Image: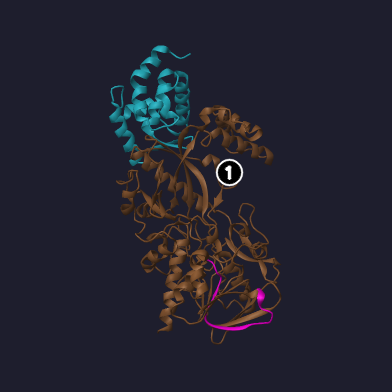
Chain colours: A cyan, B brown
Amino acid sequence: MVNKARRSFIFTASTLSALAALEVFTPIGRLQAIQDKRMQLLSRYMLDNWMKIEDMSPSDYLEKKKITMLTTANEIKAYIENDFQKEDIIVVNGFMLSKTETAILAHIDNIKS
Amino acid sequence: MILDAKLYTSPQALKADICIMGGGVAGIVLANELKAHFPNIILIESGDEFYTQEAQDLYAPSKKPDNYVDPSYSRLRFLGGTSNHWLNNTSPLSTIDFEKRDWLDNSGWPITFEDLEEHYDSAAKYCGTESDNYNRSFWQKFLHQDNVFETSKSIEFGIAKASIAPVRFFHQYGSHLRDLPSIQVIKNANVIDLEFDSETEDIKEVSFNAYNNITHNIKASTFIMCFGGIENARMLLYFNRKYNNKLGNQYDNVGRYFMDHPTMKPAQLFTQDNDLFKDNSQKVESFNVIRFIQLTEDALRKHRTTNLRMPPIPANSYQLSDGISSFHILKQAIHDGEYPDDFSTHIGNIFSDIDMVVEAVSRKSFDTKLFDNAGEFEGFELNIMMEQGPHRNNRVKLGNETDQFGIPRVEIDWELKDDDIERLWRSLAVLGKEVGMLSIGRLRILKEQSSRLFHDQMGFGHHHMGTTRMSTCEKEGVVDKHQKVFGTNNFYISGCSVFTTGGHVPPTLTIVALSIRLAQHIIGNQYG
């Protein structure tokens, strides 16, 4: 059962940061309009794929990169662009994604659980 | 003048300075370029001035791969050749296409881009796209979209130009030939034999037949074969049977290294700005300028890969549906009695995209659209044309069946090799990285759909290249840097059968440029 308080926290902080960075996605790019349930499903999907490939959890990865709830959208965007430059990339369902953005999305579900 | 071989009632013994065999793009350009320098040119063409089934049937192969298109459907065998149905899409090859690349076996032309560059302007005029180059910096001002790759070292826009309407070469240039007494165009004339003097290494004469068992001969000082990529090899193999492979085939290269331009949609591009790539072409005077995404030469060298021509095509939810693709993959797998790779992924795709799957079933079975959102723009498909490597075992050879003249029909062995596919994924990964880095969007690479991409969903440019390739020596090719057949003094080949590698762009502009260059070489020989 999704925790409403956590969902609220996610959307007001972490998720919005990720959303700013993820505006480029479609259908992910339509996250602004979707319901919580789809966001949760997406996050779960990202987490499952993350854990198949990476040894550390998304939250540990974000902590290592010093990305917190206070990190701004522009800073996340810079992290993401840097990921692509350094080929710090993860492939999820064929999508070539930055590890930072994937970790952020996966982290949402991580927080929930 | 244009003559019909069918009207000859007795064998003709003709003489010419130059005999051009084949009245397609290459043959017509050569006749046009040589007409002012030689008083007697004969051009012979198997077909008529219009389509005939009897000529077209001569292209039919005796054997080909299931997923490869029958050349009797993709080629046209009458005056003007395949220009009678081409789309007139033209781009030059790139500098790197001519280089020896250590990551691409059998690459490396015996000429450079600079050897051909001076002829591309004239070639563009033949193709109806005038000159003014193919430089994107020049054309950017005519296109109403920003150059989003301006700062990229890996990705750039390439330029193609296409005449409005497409140039039909015989229609456009045939009148010049018709009116000149110095040029005889003989239609309905099928080359069936040639005589080669192995002492002097000269072709002495060719024989032709007009579908009526009357054989005629042409003696000439110079012979040029322009039958097209498959037919050049077929006829040369046939002639070599009689002359113990002395015509450029001492090392069994004729027919080998056969390349095409496979086309497919292996990736989808989702952009932050949905208008970014929606308009990639612009009418300028009498032609369209079209831009497409490609890798830079630096990226090709750095990543040791080959190029892709990637025009982004706007696509809707229905076209981009994972569910529909997975549905087809699973359906085929069930039909074949196989367990597909990524089974759970395909099942997931179907259920998460169930509305589009239902839409597909409804459209196909009941011709009814159900969901309005199926037609909404969602992203871009990359409808790519890829460079295929020259693989020795992709080849055309002589089959067991013969045509009405007793000449063996062709057998085609062709497949997309593993290294071609590896380079495709590698090149797409370069693009994926770049669009992410530039915050343009995200690329989705459809490896999970490989079973369809490289089979029922694969198309072709129908560009039959490499079968009488240029090289520095006979050990590695069939013709030298002047397109002269090894082992002969007066026998030349033109067309994309002489390409050493195929590049990632349609070949016609380069065919014309090579033909112009060859004409100048022959003219130069005449004047010493």
On-image quarter of the C terminus of chain B: bottom left
Residues in magenta?
Answer: B6-24
Q: Position of residue B417 (x, y in %)?
A: 54, 54
> B363 and B338: which one is in front?
B363
Q: Residue at x 34, y 56 (%)?
A: B135
Q: Is residue A104 visible?
A: yes
Eyeballing the image, is B92 above or below B370? below
Q: Amino acid at mark 1?
A: Arg
Query: What residue is disc 1 on?
Result: B452
Q: Residue at x 43, y 83 (%)?
A: B526
Residue at the extreme bottom of the image, as rendered: B199
Eyeballing the image, is B430 above or below A36? below
> B210 and A29: which one is in front?
B210
Answer whether residue B22 is magenta in the image. Answer: yes
On-image quarter of the N terminus of chain B: bottom right
Eyeballing the image, is B169 above or below B282? below
Q: Residue at x 50, y 53 (%)?
A: B420
Q: Quadrant of residue B202?
A: bottom right
Q: Position of residue B161 (x, y in %)?
A: 41, 55
Q: Residue at x 32, y 26 (%)?
A: A63
Q: Could you tell me which secondary element the residue under label 1 belongs to?
A: helix
> B62 and B41: which one is in front?
B41
Dot 1 crowding, Cα within 10 Å, few <14, some 14–19, many 20+: some
Q: Position of residue B477 (x, y in %)?
A: 51, 70
Residue at the extreme front of the image, as rendered: B179
The mark total stands at 1
Q: Quadrant of residue B365?
A: top right
Answer whether residue B253 is magenta in the image. Answer: no
